[in-house]
Amino acid sequence: MDEEKPRVARYEANRRGRDFVVGDLHGCRVLLDRLLREVDFHPDRDRLFSVGDLIDRGPESMRCLDLLDEPWCHGVLGNHEVMLTDFFARAMALGGRVVWEEEHDFLRNGGGWVRRELVEGGTLIGPRLMEVLAQLQTLPHLIVVGAGPERFHVVHAELLRPTGGVSPVYLDDDIDRGFEHLTAAERGRLEEAVSWSRRLMGRGGNTTLPAVIEGLSPTYCGHTPGFELRRIASHICIDTGAYLPYLFGEERGHGWGLTIVEPRTGALYRAEP
């Protein structure tokens, strides 16, 4: 999987239990725990898929990263995980000594918790952080679950093609071919798009596209918060701003929360602080 660009992980349909997909957690583990109790989640047979951005901004980033150690939880790489690995790439080059660049995007977007919880003495990469960085390096950019009518995908941002393509989005066939028909430059752009793009969901969404694109299975994504789920071009955005009540306070943060969905039934569950 490490040689793929973007990296794709595949899982068979769950015949023993249920599957759920959770929106951007951003450190809001207590909300997830509440939702898992609500749906009567059984870790011995049920599975949880994450659209990425486990960390930053919310109160419990480390507890959310701990989900990567659970055999029942599978996630894709979000742009906040990308920023974390980019930030510490310089430290790795310096033999594990952290240079705090306050203007780095990671720190400006809620990454300050790392200094408190994962950097020993404020300047050294410790063993737990080494484990986290290694885990993040292996996370896929895209997850494919099941086949046929049951199939669904998990991605952080969007499976959007460059403008002018035959289809506005990459289709199941493109994924199943491993994107091998793309040039190296096209793969690089796609790898960036699946973690960063907001051309579909940003600024109110692309209303010129239909809710469903033939040939692309339901694709659950996050990255762009909204009060409600949005369906555009077979993408279903389930980022409903879990961290925003913590950022804005009770008055401005009202109405935001964490959402999980059960793809098989379409059932939605929501929790607010």
Image (spheres, grey):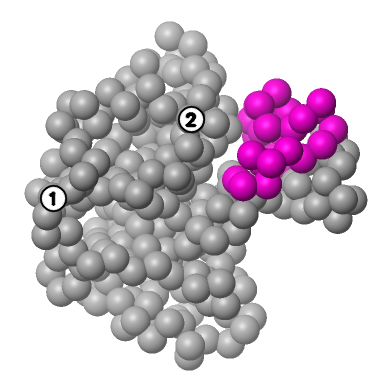
Res 68 → quadrant: top left
Residue 88 in the figure: left or right of residue 182 = right
- The magenta stretch is 105-132
Q: Secondary structure at mark 2?
A: helix
Circle 1 residue:
17
The answer, for residue 191, to whether it is visible in the render is yes
Q: Is 226 situated above or below 90?
A: above
Q: Is 173 situated above or below 13?
A: below
Q: Residue at x 86, y 55 (%)?
A: 93
The answer, for residue 162, to whether it is visible in the render is no
Residue 10 in the figure: left or right of residue 25 = left
Asked if residue 112 is among those painted magenta in the image, a careful observer would answer yes
Circle 2 residue:
63
The C terminus sits in image quarter:
top left
> What amino acid does circle 1 point to?
Gly
Q: Residue at x 57, y 53 (%)?
A: 136
Asked if residue 146 is among those painted magenta in the image, a careful observer would answer no
- Mark 1: few/some/many CA within 10 Å (<14, 14-19, 20+): few
Closest to the observer, 120 or 65 = 120
Q: Residue at x 83, y 46 (%)?
A: 96
> What amino acid does circle 2 point to?
Arg
> Where residue 28 is drawn, which disc sits there?
none
Q: Residue at x 57, y 77 (%)?
A: 3
**Callout 2–callout 1 Cβ contact below 8 Å:** no
- Mark 2: few/some/many CA within 10 Å (<14, 14-19, 20+): some
Q: Is 265 situated above or below 180?
A: above
x and y, in percent, of residue 193 in the image? 53, 63
